[in-house]
Image (cartoon, rainbow, N blue to C red):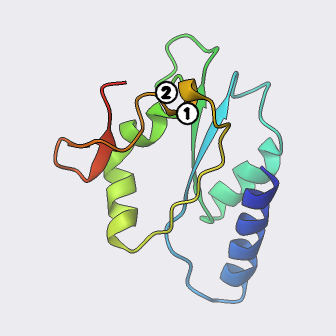
Amino acid sequence: MAPFRGFLQERESLGAKGVPIATSLLFLGCRDREDDRLYADELKAYEADGVATLIAACSRVKGYPHRYIQHAPQASATLVCEAMQQDAAVLVCATPRPSARRGCSPGRPSAGRGITSSSG
């Protein structure tokens, strides 16, 4: 999380100086959104200030829209594609376990939206 906090701090600083900042999407994986998020207050402030849009995946919350982190970008494909069309950079910080890659690895285009998926 530390590198991403640094990116957000830099973006906040640039925005405060009047430098335009591009759309930023931050996908967060946790067990429970209320109990598990480090720096929750700081991240909420960045979102409120327009520094980044935060999209959480909560593996232990029944009925939560995104259960695992690899599902969140797929469920937010429209936002991701809009950012990519504006030359967004994609940064990924994840554990290199096979289960973390299942369902979100390079493969065929998903519904023609430029998002790739595999049959997992």
Left or right for 114, reference 26: left
Q: Position of residue 57 (x, y in %)?
A: 57, 31
Q: Residues within 10 Å of mark 2 (few under 14, many from 20)?
A: many
Q: Residue furthest bottom?
A: 18
Left or right for 21, reference 117: right
Question: Is the residue 114 above or below the residue 118 in the image?
Answer: below
Residue at 55 percent across and 33 percent down: it is 69
Q: For the image shown, how many numbered marks are present on the structure?
A: 2
Q: Position of residue 101 (x, y in %)?
A: 51, 33
Residue at 68 percent across and 37 percent down: it is 95
**Residue underneath mark 2:** 66
Disc 1 marks a residue whose amino acid type is Ile
Relative depth, front residue between 120 and 70: 120
Relative depth, front residue between 20 and 1: 1
**Residue underneath mark 1:** 69
Q: Image quarter for residue 29?
A: top right
Q: Are marks 1 and 2 in contact (CB under 8 Å)?
A: yes
Left or right for 67, reference 115: right
Q: Image quarter for residue 103?
A: top left
Tag 1, which secondary structure? loop
> Which numbered disc, 1 or 2, marks the residue closer to the eye?
1
Disc 2 marks a residue whose amino acid type is His
